[in-house]
């Protein structure tokens, strides 16, 4: 606050200034926020085991369904072991059947028969393990999406660390943006947001699906993810987006002309007209337009603020109002 007593203008001719009477107004405000379009899902595709590539069906940029076979590793040795176990299982099952018949007439003991059953079950378990190992030599799409560049060729020896390709779910995208802390209560799951990009015409719509659990200590913003329908594939992941985030409508907003604000080193002030004198008041501001600014603290409806002569008016100065500024002149 500036210094000066209530009689600072005493003995001097009253200064003339224009004024503005604050009336309740409807405020429909929005924030312009930078956002980024991201794939709904994205991952690198790696083999589960090491081996030589015997088949590769990665078409760069192609759309594939979940489970689509993208490649195979050599599995000849595993299949040979599997065939051997299947033959052993056939023999073991026949032995178990004969011993079951003998057990029924008391030809063998229960213990001998139980060992035969155990052998059958053990072989079946070994077959299941080998079938699982063979399945690991298949490289499949983990979800439906669009493939990236191919990083290997047929005949290459690869390991679980090798990146075969990438896959992105792009029929739906995530719009990621950050809302300043002071507006975090305006963010609701299910709300619609509008955005535009440099590569597409018109305005797009997204639906807020998730909100970060807390405010970032570094940026003092709240991270938000909205889902975007991209079935036509017009939007590209990684692109920049201009988000138009609508704030709650206030039907009793306090708005004043921007020229009323006196910026200071630490605070912002306006000059109130009270009882024929100037009174300096510290205010807090909200959203602004080209010529108007919202006052969130410091002023109330019905106050009269000065709009001209601000540099020459001191605290406590006598003031006469030459004219009142209208809303449509602001």
Image (spheres, rainbow, N blue to C red):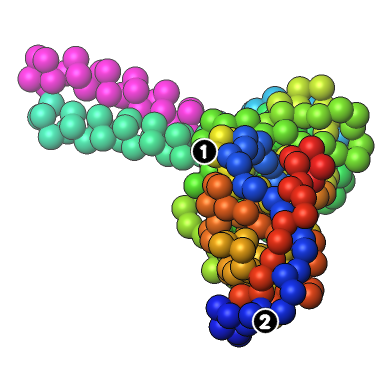
Q: Which residue is mark 1?
A: 188
Residue 281 at x, y percent in the picture = 58, 68
Out of 239 and 221, give the one closest to the viewer. Answer: 221
Residue at the (27%, 18%) spot, across then down = 97
Callout 1 secondary element: loop
Callout 2 secondary element: loop
Residue 191 at x, y percent in the picture = 57, 32
Residue 25 at x, y percent in the picture = 62, 37
Query: Residue 179 vs residue 17: left or right?
Result: left
Mark 1 closeness class: few <14, some 14–19, many ≥20 residues within 10 Å: some
Mark 2 closeness class: few <14, some 14–19, many ≥20 residues within 10 Å: few
Q: Is residue 88 magenta?
A: yes
Residue at the (46%, 40%) spot, across then down = 129
Q: Residue 11 got which mark?
A: 2
Quadrant for the N terminus, please: bottom right
Query: Residue 274 vs residue 193: left or right?
Result: left
Out of 246 and 115, give the one closest to the viewer. Answer: 246
Between the C-alphas of marks 2 and 1, the distance is 58 Å
Q: Is residue 73 magenta?
A: no
* Residue 110 visible (yes or no): yes
Q: Which residues are magenta?
A: 85-107
- Magenta segment's dominant SS is helix
Residue 8 at x, y percent in the picture = 63, 82
Query: Residue 196 vs residue 210: left or right?
Result: right
Residue at the (34%, 23%) spot, across then down = 93
Dot placed on the residue nearer the N-terminal end, 2 or 1? 2
Residue 140 falls in which quadrant of the image?
top right
């Amino acid at each position: 606050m500036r210094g000066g007593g209530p009689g600072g203008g005493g003995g001097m001719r009253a200064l003339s200034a224009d004024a503005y009477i604050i009336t309740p107004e409807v405020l429909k405000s929005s924030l312009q926020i930078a956002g980024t379009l991201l794939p709904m899902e994205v991952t690198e595709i790696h083999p589960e085991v090491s081996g030589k590539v015997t088949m590769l069906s990665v078409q760069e940029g192609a759309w594939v369904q979940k489970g689509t076979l993208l490649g195979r590793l050599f599995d000849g040795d595993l299949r040979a072991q599997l065939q051997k176990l299947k033959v052993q299982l056939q023999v073991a099952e026949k032995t178990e059947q004969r011993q079951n018949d003998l057990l029924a007439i008391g030809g063998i003991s229960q213990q001998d028969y139980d060992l035969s059953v155990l052998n059958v079950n053990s072989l079946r378990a070994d077959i299941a393990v080998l079938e699982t190992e063979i399945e690991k030599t298949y490289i499949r799409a983990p979800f439906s999406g669009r493939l990236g560049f191919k990083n290997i060729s047929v005949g290459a020896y690869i390991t679980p660390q090798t990146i075969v390709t990438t896959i992105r779910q792009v029929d739906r995208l995530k719009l990621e943006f950050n809302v300043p802390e002071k507006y975090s209560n305006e963010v609701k799951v299910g709300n619609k947001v509008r955005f535009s990009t440099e590569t597409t015409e018109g305005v797009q719509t997204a639906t807020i699906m998730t909100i970060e659990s807390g405010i970032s200590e570094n940026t003092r913003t709240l991270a938000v993810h909205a889902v975007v329908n991209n079935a036509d594939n017009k939007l590209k992941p990684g692109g920049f987006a201009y988000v138009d985030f609508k704030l709650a409508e206030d039907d009793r907003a306090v708005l004043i002309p921007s020229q009323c604000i006196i910026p200071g080193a630490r605070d912002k002030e306006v000059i109130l007209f009270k009882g024929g004198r100037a009174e300096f008041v510290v205010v807090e501001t909200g959203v602004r337009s080209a010529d108007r600014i919202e006052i969130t603290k410091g002023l109330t409806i019905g106050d009269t603020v000065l709009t001209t002569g601000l540099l020459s008016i001191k605290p406590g100065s006598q003031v006469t109002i030459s004219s009142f500024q209208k809303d449509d002149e602001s």
